[in-house]
Image (spheres, helix red, strand yellow):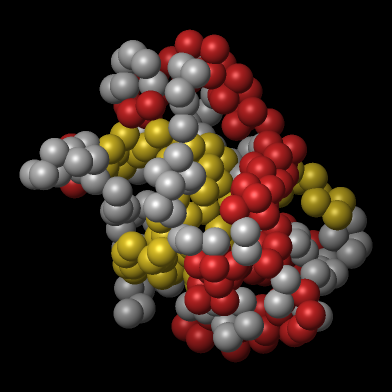
Amino acid sequence: MKREQLDQMLETLWLDFLARTPDAGRIHSLLLPENPQLRIDHLSLHTLALPRVNITQLAKPFERAGYQSRGEFDITGTRLFARHYEHPDPSLPKLLLTELNVDSLGDEVRNILHQLISQIAPATLQQDNFCISGRHWKIDFDTYQQLQRCSEHAAWIAAFGFRAHHYALLINSLNQDDDIDELNDYLLEQGFRLDSRNGLVQGSADEYLEQSATVPGNTEVEFSDRRAQVPGGHCAFIRRYPTSDGRLYQGFIRTSAVSPGPYPHYR
């Protein structure tokens, strides 16, 4: 994939995300006038640990465009595994790809996910822009709710398919007041809801990374039997700290981008 194709795909991912996540557009518009150098730290893509759509498959077009794997980890307290990628051009966002260990699920839920993925045409899987191809199957609302009770990750993919799950803005790129607590206070004053289930801030300076996030807004989705409002995307905020070499830490922490769940550490 050539650079211009990569730029176009990243732009399409961003515009699709903004269309589904109005809060992200509002926040970006609020911060940009006073922070013209505002940068996206990373974008997140969600997938399943199945041969046709796993992280390795989803990352191939990005790797052909120059992205390289820089780290991987299990996300604590979940059935999720993540890998992050960086491009030699630091102006491009990092990629955080997260997959759900389908084999660790119950038979009924596992069969639902296999059945959904089986409906994707083989030719579609080979296209460079598969990661922005959306949903390839019909699903009724009851089945979506069944997945939601088991795994938010699985339910989100079932409802939205393949597209950006969330974007994270880099707090370090703000001109002033790059303190995460001050940014959180400002966003709360502006009427945004922040995820506080585990406190407003995850991580710490000792871990070289702090992060917070908005509560996912509801998005109308057309199911096979009805339209319904379901949790969609959210906007995250990343504050990075320098390591011993003086450079900003570029990795992630094991609690990144996920709420706690009743699932065992599976790897």
Residue 197 in view? no
- Which residue is located at x 68 percent, y 48 percent? 8
User: From what the image shows, is residue 90 above or below residue 138?
Assistant: above
- Which residue is located at x 31 percent, y 34 percent? 239
Q: Position of residue 161 (x, y in %)?
A: 71, 63
User: From what the image shows, is residue 91 above or below residue 76?
Assistant: above
- Which residue is located at x 46 percent, y 32 percent? 39
Q: Position of residue 188 (x, y in %)?
A: 47, 19
User: From what the image shows, is residue 216 above or below residue 38?
Assistant: below
Residue 121 in view? yes
- Residue 170 is left or right of residue 126, and the answer is left
| Residue 243 vs residue 199, the one in the foreground | 243
User: From what the image shows, is residue 153 above or below residue 11?
Assistant: below
Extreme-right residue of the structure: 225
| Residue 186 vs residue 208, the one in the foreground | 208
Q: Position of residue 178 (x, y in %)?
A: 31, 21
| Residue 140 vs residue 84, the one in the foreground | 84
Extreme-left residue of the structure: 244
Q: Position of residue 251 (x, y in %)?
A: 30, 53
Quarter holding the C terminus is bottom left
